[in-house]
Image (spheres, rainbow, N blue to C red):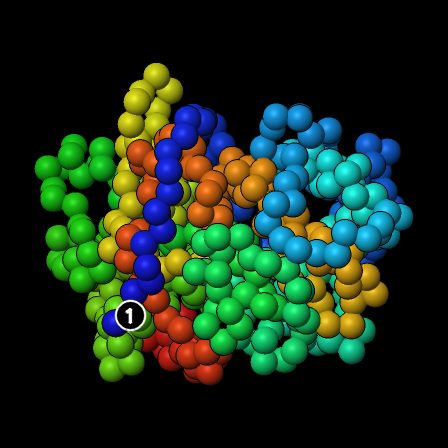
Amino acid sequence: MRRAAQTTRPQTTRPLAITVAVTASLALGGCSLGGGAQQDESGGSSEETADGGETTGGGGGSADASGSGAPSQSSGSADDKDLSGRTVSLVTHDSFNPPEGALEAFTERTGIEVKVLKSGDAGSLTNKLVLTADNPLGDAVFGIDNTFGGRALDEGVVAEHGLDLPEGVADHAMEADGGARLAPVDAGDVCVNIDDTWFEKEGINPPTSLDDLTKPEYKGLFVTPGASTSSPGLAFLLATIGEKGEDGWEQYWKDLVANDVKVTAGWEDAYTVDFTAGGGNGDRPIVLSYASSPPFTVPEGGDEPTTSALLDTCFRQVEYAGVLEGAKEPEAAAKVVEFLLGEEFQTGLPDAMYVYPVRQDVELPEAWEQWAPPAEEPIEVDAARIQENREDWLLRWSEAAGQ
């Protein structure tokens, strides 16, 4: 078993609200595609979906001069020549939700307009980029993660961006790339979460490990999204492969099935319908979610969450940005990637997209420091190994899990 290195961060103060709990974790699931769109009246950015429907992008509104949405370009070394008037089509997953006003402020500062083209989850996004490699969908990409990054590199859909990565960013890069083509932007730990209030009320000691989930005392208590239909579900499958090894993970899943695990189509059903602390009167106090989920279960008037994440069960998802090979505007696209690595954009990631920034100099909100620290040793599976075995693993998972 291989585990990734700890992410260490300083503290700051920025409280979170429980009212965004569902939206928070939904953003982490990643998720549709578009073609170009017209700039909206507020300027700066617009977005389209695959069916051509247009919506206003970039969080809407102007960036506060002191707010987390204002971009900072201290992160890189992109050419400083005047690129004003250029338009960059940024292909993303459906959950791309930049800090409010960030894209508008970027356009105001650089003159580069950004069109956000949403393209499904990380898997769909990567597949579409591969299929359209000869006629790229856009100029830049955000949202390919480490479960599909190997394919993007193997298929040559991203070019070298030529940026100097800020301190700490390269630590999250794929070994085969070093961040030269796919620059790490954010990370999220997919972990088992438990309803502490439920276990206390029932007088049952909660589970603490993956092995515990197969024990009789937890029969019928665990719900997880499926690996073939959900990004966090795939991450959990990879956690079990990394933990149990090639010779043990299928039996582990058979043991989970024997212990009445419930497999849902996606995270939303698992968390908001079946989880006892998800607001849907569910009956399962153990759920697959994120290390960042607990702060959103602090009740109104309370000072601590009613749930917790089991940090020894986590698989770290890392999302990348890059310049697409064959882009019409490669220089302006590199500026967009540089912007995503900027200090202010990175600072706004926890509140806007509910993920951990990858810059070492960026502080986490106080509630995250206290109740949502990243796993010290997340379970790791090499991206090249994932690329080589993903389809086979999913087929074998379907058989072992009865899906």
Residue 370 makes an appearance in the image: yes
**What residue is rendered at 73% in x and 75% in y?**
133
Quarter of the figure that contains the N terminus:
bottom left
Q: Position of residue 223 (x, y in %)?
A: 33, 53
Q: Secondary structure at mark 1?
A: strand
Q: Does residue 182 appear to the left or right of 369 in the view shown?
A: right
Give the residue at x 17% y 57%.
212
> As rendered, which of 148 and 274 lies closer to the eye?
148
Of residues 171 and 286, the one nearer the viewer is: 171
CA neighbours of label 1 inside 10 A, class few (<14), some (14 to 19), many (20+): few
Q: Is residue 325 left or right of residue 177?
A: right
Q: Residue at image x 82%, y 53%?
A: 81
Instruction: Look at label 1 and name its amino acid.
Output: Arg
- The quarter of the displayed image where residue 298 is located: top left
Which residue is tagged 1? 2
**Left or right of 140, for residue 37:** right
352 w.r.t. 167: above or below: above
* Front in this rendered view, residue 75 or 184: 75
Q: Which quadrant is home to the C terminus?
A: bottom left
Percent across and percent down for residue 226 are 42, 62
Q: Is residue 365 above or below residue 285?
A: above
Q: Measured from the top left, where is residue 3 in percent x and y?
A: 29, 65
From what the image shows, is residue 238 above or below residue 66? below
Seen in the picture, residue 70 relative to 388 is either above or below; the reply is above
